[in-house]
Image (cartoon, rainbow, N blue to C red):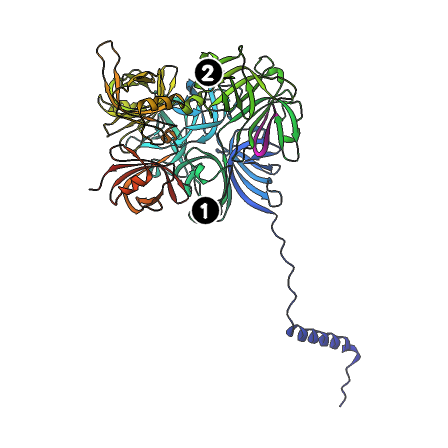
Amino acid sequence: MIIKIPRIIYPLFMLLFTVLIVSCNDSSSSSPEPPPEEPPTTTDITTVGEISGFGSVIVNGVEYETEASSISDDDDNSLSENDLSVGMIVTLSGSVNIDAPNTGTASSIEYSAELKGFIDEINLMDSYIAVHGQIILFNELTFFENTSPETLEMGDFVEVNGFFNDTEQLVATRIELDDEDNEISIKGFVNNLDTVAQTFSLSNLLINYAEAEFDDFTAADLADGQQVKVKGLLTNLTDDTLQVDKVKLITHNDEPDSHAEIKGLITDFVSATEFMVNGINVTTNSQTEIENGDSTQLGNNVNVEVEGQFNDDNVLVASEVEIEDDLEVEVDGVIEAIDATNNTIVVLGVTFSVTDLTRMDDKSDADERFFNFSQLSVGDFVEVKGFSNADGDNIATRIVREDEDDDNGEDDLDRITGLVSDIDSELFTFSVAGIPVATTATTEFEIADDVDASRDEFFAQLVDGMVIKVKGNFDNEDNEVFVAVEVELEDEGLEQHNRPELTGPVTSIDIESLSFVIFGKTINTNAMTEFRPLDGDDLSQASFFEVLQIGDMLEVKGQMQLDDFIARRAEFEDDLRQEIEGIAENIGDDSFTVVGINIDISSASEFELENGLAVSKAEFLAALAMSTGRVEVRGEFVEGAEGVEGVFVATKVELEIQDDDDNDDQLELTGLVSAINSELFTFTLTDTEVATTETTRFETAEDVSVSREDFFAQLSDGMELEVKGNFEGEVFIADEVEIETMTP
């Protein structure tokens, strides 16, 4: 039978037929795949750090566009980019370009000054000021705006930015002389919380919060150790107590897997895998890249930039840690060459690498706000500060362009500051930052604090590794030899090699001058001194002198300023052993002095070199004459008759290179030993694996230095040891091991 389809519905029939055919085909084959997703071109980021330049804003080495950014302070007041300055610490949220990681876009920038207030102490010798009891340290990298260290005055109103160190002092990145304001604001760490009196301390300032408004938390949430920012009126400051209007808790709560870059000083250092930076917990692992060093160089107060991602515990897992070493090289002069490909400049024959973290500032008449590497020219007069990395390359940390005729108004002298080497005391020559330096009969010499010295006196104190400043000029156009007009041994050069230590009983206390006497030597303290009890938290200066008594045993570490002994640290001891450590002077056949204390070695029974080798007195004195002169002396101080100086009678004298304990970043472990391995020379102490090396020093309970083999031969489980050193990964590398008590 033939079915005829009416003409009028034929098109509809064909359409239906086509749909059915397509449907059948679709059921027998897979659907076409969607186009691949475009890979992301940016990474979201939160970064906390110092503004190092503009164009638009450079933070932690990344240049962020700010056209669509919201910029504000921590009170939500709107700011413009013109309100920002080099050296300010900001929190920036935005994104970084994946294909150009040194560029990005900022969505928000928040600025918060660490401190605003009036100066109540200035100490140029120790490079610090105090503002309402808060210690602010400054250094060669601190930017001063509208002022300088020399022109600051008591009562000046300043705004300060910076990073807190491990002793809760503020290391300033920027200090600005500002118009006076009745409002004081201070960031710091809560101590001595008294919930009944409703007070706590920020360093040496007592905060009364009875009438304060709390931002995002309550008074009941306050706890010692928290970082807070307080604000109050100058009119509410009475003596050392500030009645504050506002208390804000500083917290860091970040989403898991969020990306961050932070810059600051390491604090709360436990090991290379556990420390804090800017109040943020940081950990490293085997994949972490460490630039300009390795994990053994990590420790408290080391300046670092950390990049990584937060984990579920709000800990930043570092993918990269960049170490910024202490200043080692400084030159002032004309740029002789620029390599735009490798981002280097040459000044006075010294090549510097300019990195994304180099701080750039233009103080010339051009006054370029958006000053960067591309605007440098051969012939520009610059001041360059930097350090040498592990490969020996000089890394510029700060470049300031100046007008040459503004250079302190001095003659046409170039300047070099750096570590001294290649000393020749016969030809009176040396090298600084690799530049050969010659002195002449007319060269002027200073030994810190403007103390003049003869050429012979200066070279007698000079040791490789000291920091010196040289002014002069090259003797010819080839820049082969720098002829010195003035040479100065910097304070840090002396401090590095002459940090005396005294351990002994207190024989006199002067509350008024905040000083005391040990071994007949007056020990002065100041706002920089650390005071440590036998147990518990550090003491304030006032609390220390409240509890100090005649006869107390103290270990005091300090530095000499002219003839004054200034304590860096005073620590109570329960050990009655008396010791003196420092540079030996006025050396005779049976005596010498250390920091002016007379030491009698005529009856000493033991003399040792730095490697622990026992020698005769004559051999010791010969070695002393060829060394840096640093000694450690044990014995007993004998008071002199009235009007007669006392004498320290030595029983043992050791030649020292430099006590590793002078390193404030060194750690100390004390506990019972176990898991001894006399083949690998390792053991366990308080659940920590300890490794020793060929340079580790060993002492028995009788304070006798022994070899590593002899030490392990008498070591047994249960002995109490004191170990000094640092972590390298999970293993503690010992610099010094001493038996405290033998097996019970």
Name the quadrant of the N terminus.
bottom right
Image height of 99 relative to 382, above or below? below
- Tell me the SS state at disc 1: loop
Outermost residue, right direction? Answer: 7
**The label number, if any, that marks residue 285 in the structure image:** 1
- The residue range painted magenta reads 347-361
- Tell me the SS state at disc 2: helix
Q: CA distance from mark 1 to mark 2?
A: 47 Å
* Nearer to me, 36 or 355: 355
Q: Which residue is labeled 2 in the image?
A: 458
* Nearer to me, 554 or 607: 607
- For discs 1 and 2, the disc positioned in front in the rendered view: 2
* Residue drawn where x is 45% and y is 23% of the image: 463
Residue 458 at x, y percent in the picture: 46, 16
Prevailing secondary structure class for the magenta stretch in the rendered image: strand
Residue 644 at x, y percent in the picture: 25, 10
Q: Report whether residue 147 is seen.
A: no
Does 6 sit left or right of 287 as displayed? right
Image height of 677 relative to 704, above or below? below
Q: Amino acid at mark 1?
A: Asn
Image height of 39 relative to 361, above or below? below
Residue 675 at x, y percent in the picture: 30, 48
Task: Quadrant for residue 17, please give it.
Answer: bottom right
Residue 258 at x, y percent in the picture: 50, 46
Circles 1, 2 touching at the beta carbon (< 8 Å): no
Q: Residues within 10 Å of mark 1 (few under 14, many from 20)?
A: few
**The label number, if any, that marks residue 616 in the structure image:** none
Q: Report whether residue 192 is seen.
A: yes
Q: Amino acid at mark 2?
A: Phe
